[in-house]
Amino acid sequence: MMLVFRWAIERGQKVENPADLVRPSTIAKFEPRDRALTPEEIGLMYQYMERIGTTPSIRAAAKLLLLTMVRKSELTNATWSEINFIDALWTIPKERMKRRNSHLVFLSRQVLEIFTALKTFAGGSEYVLPSRYDSDLPMSSATLNQVLTLTYRLAQKEGQSLGKFGPHDLRRTASTLLHEAGYNTDWIEKCLAHEQKGVRAVYNKAEYRDQRRAMLQDWADMIDEWTIRKIRPKD
C-alpha cells in the first residue's frame, strides 16, 4: 500500500497517505514466540493452578502438557484406546499427528497416576478428556488456554513473577530445560515429534526409546522437585 501512495505522489498526484496519521505507539506489538518458563515459574504455575476455579481434570490436562511434551490437540483428542497402562505407553496414531507419523509417548510414574485419575473422571467416555457438557465429545482446545490464562493472571495479581504463557510454551519449556540439563537433542526432538530434515533425516532412523523413557521420568522428577515448595503471596 505504501508503494501505491508513493507512486501517485511521484507523479504529481495530491493524495494523503492515511498511514502517515497512525502513531507508532498505536501499532500492535507482536510478542516473540520464544517463551519458556523457569523452574521457579513452573512452581508458581502448579501452585496457582490449584487456586483457580476449574475442575481436577482440567488441571491434570495442563500438567500433562508439560509432562508429556505433546501438542495441545494431541492431548485433548486422546482416547483411552491409545493408552497402554501395562507398558506405560501412549501411542498417538498418525491420523492425529501433525507430520502424519504415529508417535510414542513414554509415560512416567507421575503421568500414569494422572491417567489413572482421569480414567475415573471420564465416566465411561472414550476420550481421556471429555467435554464437560457432552461426554461423547473431547474437551475444547480453548479450555487449556483459559486455565493457563487464569493461572498466570492470579499469580500476577498477587505480585508473583509469572509471565504470560500458553499451551505451546510448555513444550518449549520442556525442550529448553532438558537441553540446559544436558540431555541429547535427538532424544528431545523425538519427544516433541519434530521431524529431522536433510541428509540427517535419511540416515538417522533411531527412535531412542530407552533413552526417551528414562529422560521423561527424569523430567517428571525434576518437575516434582520444583513444585514442592510453596510460595507465599506478596503483600
Image (tube, rainbow, N blue to C red):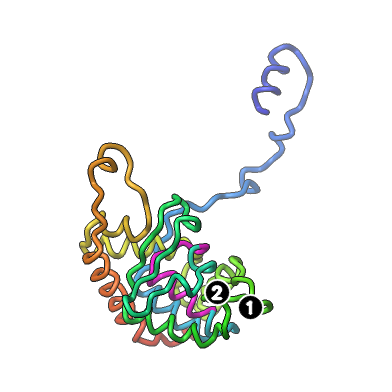
Judging depth in this view, the residue of 137 and 81 nearest the camera is 81
Q: Is residue 167 left or right of residue 196?
A: right
Q: Is residue 100 left or right of residue 219?
A: right
Give the percent coordinates (x, y) of residue 234.
47, 84
The answer to whether residue 52 is seen in the rendering is: no
Residue 129 found in image quarter = bottom right
The answer to whether residue 180 is seen in the rendering is: yes
Write the start and end of the magenta stretch as one range.
58-73
Give the percent coordinates (x, y) of residue 26.
65, 48
Judging depth in this view, the residue of 84 and 192 nearest the camera is 84
Q: Amino acid at mark 2?
A: Tyr
Contact (CB < 8 A) between labels 2 and 1? Answer: yes
Q: Give the residue drawn at x 41%, y 53%.
A: 101
* Mark number displayed over residue 135: 1
Q: CA distance from mark 2 to mark 1?
A: 8 Å
Assign a secondary structure to mark 2: loop
Is the residue marked by circle 1 packed among few (<14), some (14-19), or many (20+) residues within 10 Å?
A: some
Is the residue marked by circle 2 packed among few (<14), some (14-19), or many (20+) residues within 10 Å?
A: many
As drawn, the residue found furthest toward the right would be 14
Give the percent coordinates (x, y) of residue 216.
29, 70
- Dominant secondary structure of the magenta stretch? helix
- Mark 2 sits on what residue? 127
Q: Give the residue drawn at x 42%, y 73%.
A: 83
Residue 182 found in image quarter = bottom left
Q: Is residue 38 above or below residue 118?
A: above
Q: Earlier in the sequence, mark 2 or mark 1?
A: 2
Give the percent coordinates (x, y) of residue 66.
41, 70
* Mark number displayed over residue 126: none
Q: Is residue 37 left or right of residue 180?
A: right
Q: Is residue 93 above or below residue 199?
A: below
Figure quadrant of the N terminus: top right
Q: Amino acid at mark 1?
A: Ser
